[in-house]
Image (cartoon, helix red, strand yellow):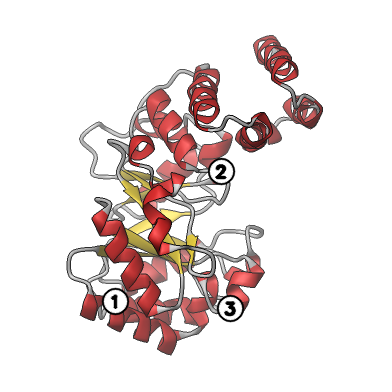
Amino acid sequence: MNIEKNTPVKLYMAPLQSYTTSFYRKAHAMTYGHMDKYFSPFFDDADTDLKKLKHHPELCSSLNNKLRVIPQVASNNSEFLISFADEAGKLGYNEINLNMGCPFPMLVKRQKGGGLLAQVDLAKRLLDSFFSNTNEINLSLKIRLGVTNTKEGQAIVKLANEFPVKELIVHPRLVAQKYSGVVNWDEFETISAISIHKLIANGDINSQQDAFKILNRFPNIKGLMLGRGLLSDPGLATSILKERNNQQLFTLHEHYYHLITNYFTNWNQAFNYFLTFWHYPLSSNQNFKRHLRKLKKHNKPKLYHDWLKQLNALVNSL
């Protein structure tokens, strides 16, 4: 079963720090075709220099050209959020996304990311200020079910109903769960009944079957956001929409390799990106996982290319 081409469902690439970089997004689009939206890893107000935003590789126009990229922000500071939106607008972006779901403990402790879910009054002041001072830039929210209980997430969804939020992306886990435990689609159904905004579903969508199960249960959602499932299987979006070629992983790497080595002249910097690139695709299979462990010892150009040839032979032998 495949979704018809005229389906209204949208497919988004989730933001994962250090993984879904501008280089990866560009290489993925070159290999598999464009997804509907690509969300950048978040910009934290603690270490983002707004004056240098236009030079940041995540917002580089040549790498994001023809891609619908949405810069994501982790902040509880309304002045920063408004200023970020203004700078992003100058660079040609018409939407930003507020991260209200990241479970990183240091972020949560500072009442940012997923930590905002337990701070309804703070979130209200943030949204009030943004929508009172920003007219031309859309704001979407990426949330979880709450920090420690689902009532927190429900309160944030009701709050979002008071504002012209572009869309609501929901990962149906608690912040306290991080990435473990079962995704709570029953609570997602509760949120879908509360929200006046169209929803995007995110969380443990690892196969075509997972996608169809969600779409069949929630036919009114706007789309799916693919994260770790897409990194593990870069052709996942293609398989949801149509048949795909399973050999495209090495083509993706080829595009990625050229983008990285053209940008970074220092091989050690480039190699760190290759370590990240192979983590998810090779972690799910024990044979590939053993080969992945060898990668750290292949940290010179020739050694890396030898490792690639061995991987290709291994893939073809299975």
- Rounded to the nearest angstrom, the CA distance separating label 2 from label 1 is 29 Å
Residue 314: image location, x then y, percent: 71, 14
Dot 1 amino acid type: Phe
Decide: is 91 above or below 162. above
Which quadrant: the N terminus? top left
Q: Amino acid at mark 2?
A: Tyr
For the residue labelled by badge 2, is the local secondary structure a helix, a strand or a loop?
Answer: loop
Residue identified by numbered label 3: 110
User: Please, is residue 208 above or below residue 115 in the view?
Assistant: above
Q: Are marks 2 and 1 in contact (CB under 8 Å)?
A: no
Q: Residue at left 43%, top 37%?
A: 25
Label 3 vs label 2: CA separation? Answer: 24 Å
Q: Along the line of sight, which residue is nearer the eye, 204 or 234?
A: 234
**Along the horizontal axis of the image, is 207 left or right of 275?**
left
In the rendered image, is residue 150 in sight?
Answer: no
Instruction: Residue 142 in the image: state x and y as whole percent.
Output: 42, 63
Nearest the viewer among 266 and 32 is: 266
SS of the residue under disc 3:
loop
Residue under numbered circle 2: 19
Mark 2 or mark 1: which comes first in sequence?
Answer: 2
The spot of residue 155 in percent (x, y) is: 41, 82
Report how far apart the C-alphas of labels 1 and 3 lie in the structure: 20 Å
Q: Determine the residue located farthest toward the left in the rendered image.
A: 135
Foreground of the two, 227 or 189: 227
The residue identified by callout 1 is: 130
